[in-house]
């Protein structure tokens, strides 16, 4: 019985840790119809270990003026690092971004931190073969009821 309770405790802590990473992360520039530039990046981490990424960029005088790029694949968590992988079968005419080798640090407020400071949950990308992803920080979208 003692081993069973220990097993349940370990299993529940693993599930809780994975659940806090799952969700939608985004970066969005403040823009309106009259601005020359707009940027929207959305990353969705699903509980089954898959992800989808969407990047929208509009530059008024750009060629082309609007671009939409997509990526998908799998992710796994190792401590505070999220590792992304894209299989060849995940890529097609729509999903053209290969996230293999991309790593992001998971940023959140520690449950032990009892201070009033606010730390927004985010992903900070520090390694990627996609040059414009390295250094990107996406904030977790809060669920509002």
Image (cartoon, grey):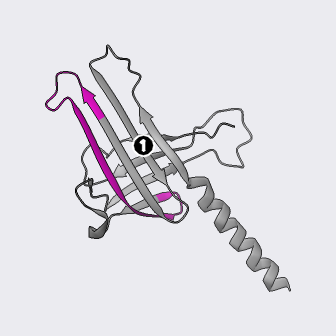
Q: Is residue 9 magenta?
A: no
Locate residue 93: give its quadrant: bottom left
Q: Residues within 10 Å of mark 1 (few under 14, many from 20)?
A: some
Point 41% across, 61% down: residue: 83
User: What count of labels does the image hold?
Assistant: 1
* x then y, percent, for residue 144: 65, 36
* x then y, percent, for residue 135: 35, 42
Residue beneath disc 1 = 42
Point 53% across, 66% down: residue: 48
Q: Farthest residue to the right: give it.
A: 1
Image height check: is 1 above or below 30? below
Q: Farthest residue to the left: give it.
A: 63
Point 72% across, 49% down: residue: 112
Left or right? Give the position of 35 relative to 30: left
Quarter holding the N terminus? Answer: bottom right
* x then y, percent, for residue 17: 63, 60
Nearer-the-camera pick, 123 or 55: 55
Q: Farthest residue to the front: give it.
A: 93
Point 55% across, 50% down: residue: 23
Nearer-the-camera pick, 20 or 71: 71
Locate residue 12: give its quadrant: bottom right
Mark 1 lies on a secondary structure that is: strand
* x then y, percent, for residue 25: 49, 44
Quarter holding the C terminus? Answer: top right
Q: Is residue 62 magenta?
A: yes
Image height check: is 4 above or below 123? below
**Residue range (magenta):** 57-81
Left or right? Give the position of 114 relative to 20: right
Image height check: is 124 above or below 31? below
Question: Principal SS element in the magenta part?
Answer: strand
Locate residue 58: give its quadrant: top left
């Amino acid at each position: 019985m003692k081993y069973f309770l220990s097993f349940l405790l370990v299993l529940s802590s693993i599930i809780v840790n994975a659940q806090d990473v799952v969700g939608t992360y985004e970066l969005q520039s403040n823009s309106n119809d009259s601005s020359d530039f707009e940027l929207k990046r959305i990353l969705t981490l699903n509980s089954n270990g898959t992800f989808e990424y969407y990047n929208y960029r509009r530059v008024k005088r750009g060629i082309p003026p609007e671009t939409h790029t997509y990526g998908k694949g799998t992710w796994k968590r190792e401590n505070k690092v999220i590792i992304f992988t894209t299989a060849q079968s995940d890529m097609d005419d729509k999903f053209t971004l290969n996230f293999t080798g991309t790593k992001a640090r998971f940023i959140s407020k520690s449950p032990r931190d009892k201070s009033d400071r606010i730390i927004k949950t985010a992903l900070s990308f520090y390694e990627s073969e996609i040059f414009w992803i390295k250094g990107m920080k996406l904030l977790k979208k809060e669920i509002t009821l």
